[in-house]
Image (cartoon, rainbow, N blue to C red):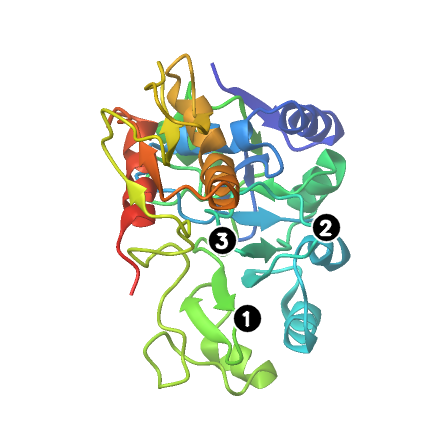
Amino acid sequence: MTRRLAADGAGIAQAADILRNGGLVAFGTETVYGLGADATDAHAVARIFAAKERPSFNPLISHFPDADRAFVHAHADGRARRLAQRFWPGPLTMVLPRTAECAVCDLAGAGLPSIAVRVPAGDVARALLAAAGVPVAAPSANPSGGVSPSRAEHVLDGLEGRIDAVLDSGPCAVGVESTIVDLTGPVPVLLRPGGVTIEALREVCPDIALPHGGSDARPVAPGRLSSHYAPTLPVRLGAVSVAPDEALLAFGPELPGSPLTWNLSPGEKLEEAAARLFAGLRFLDMEGRRRGLRAIAVQPVPAHGLGAAIGDRLSRAACPRT
């Protein structure tokens, strides 16, 4: 059963404790209710995808109580700092390169070298983030494909019994998701319109481009390329045998014959497999190349539940690179 917590000191403390212990808490921001988990805990983040029945591992936004804590994990150039000064706290998300100190797990960032960060407005949201003391990954608190929730009742309509608690801070003021701006390239790109308008953004960044707004624009949002940040070694899906010069990404009982294996879940648990996916691909790629292996063979993963999202990411990793 999902607990409904009051937005007072005791409720905030309980919600923060749930987050620190790997639980899921929906909480209101000025935009919509987010489904929060400790962004440094891959197992907790996997629970977000399971609860939402999200079909692919798209990058999640990590939330912070202030810009200083956000910029520990994300590299902020002058453009990012000017945008933060103008629009934070508020409905703006920035996609920035990860710092060396970034503790956000690979699953929350979909294996990308960037991280999406936001400082939401609202005293309750920021008090929760400060009390939790960890980055909080939080997509909208609704089943994937559903309408984003702007009240606690909306959250419970879709996620009752799937999450640990909802911190009820009343209706959201904006009711639409945050604006997302990609600052990982030389030209800032608007990836998603939202609570901050393009006109307001251009007052700070006059050269901001739309995804198809010109030759200098970076046209693809994180996670939309058929092949992005795939391993250097070729990936072979659906393996029923493995060669001596192949690394093995296993699921359940391991195929014999590989000199290098990473098992996503010996017990065939999809949440565990999701939590270990990006770390496993990274390990097999780096160690496999060091050992002179030629490819990564991937055992089949069931396509139901989180298996669909795991399969989506593996298919992207296996796409031919041009």
Whichever of labels 2 and 1 marks the residue nearer the N terminus, that label is 2
The answer to whether residue 145 is seen in the rendering is no
Task: Estimate the x, y position of residue 24 in percent, counting from the top left.
Answer: 54, 28
Q: Quadrant of residue 248?
A: top left
Amino acid type assigned to the residue bearing label 3 in the image: Leu
In this rendering, would 19 be left or right of 132? left
| Residue position marked by numbered label 1 in the rendering | 183
Image quarter in which the C terminus is found = bottom left
User: First in sequence: mark 3 or mark 2?
Assistant: 2
How packed mark 3 is, by other alpha carbons closer than 10 Å (few <14, some 14-19, many 20 or more), is some
* Residue 310 appears left or right of 102: left
- Residue underneath mark 3: 112
Mark earlier in primary sequence (1, 3): 3
The 10 Å Cα crowd at callout 1, few under 14, some 14 to 19, many 20 or more, is many
For residue 188, above or below residue 110: below
**Nearest to the observer: residue 133 or residue 287:** 287
Asked if residue 20 can be seen in this view, the reply is: yes
The label shown at residue 113 is none
* Nearer-the-camera pick, 169 or 110: 110
Q: Which mark is residue 101?
A: 2
Foreground residue among 36 and 80: 80
Q: Nearer the viewer, mark 2 or mark 1?
A: 2
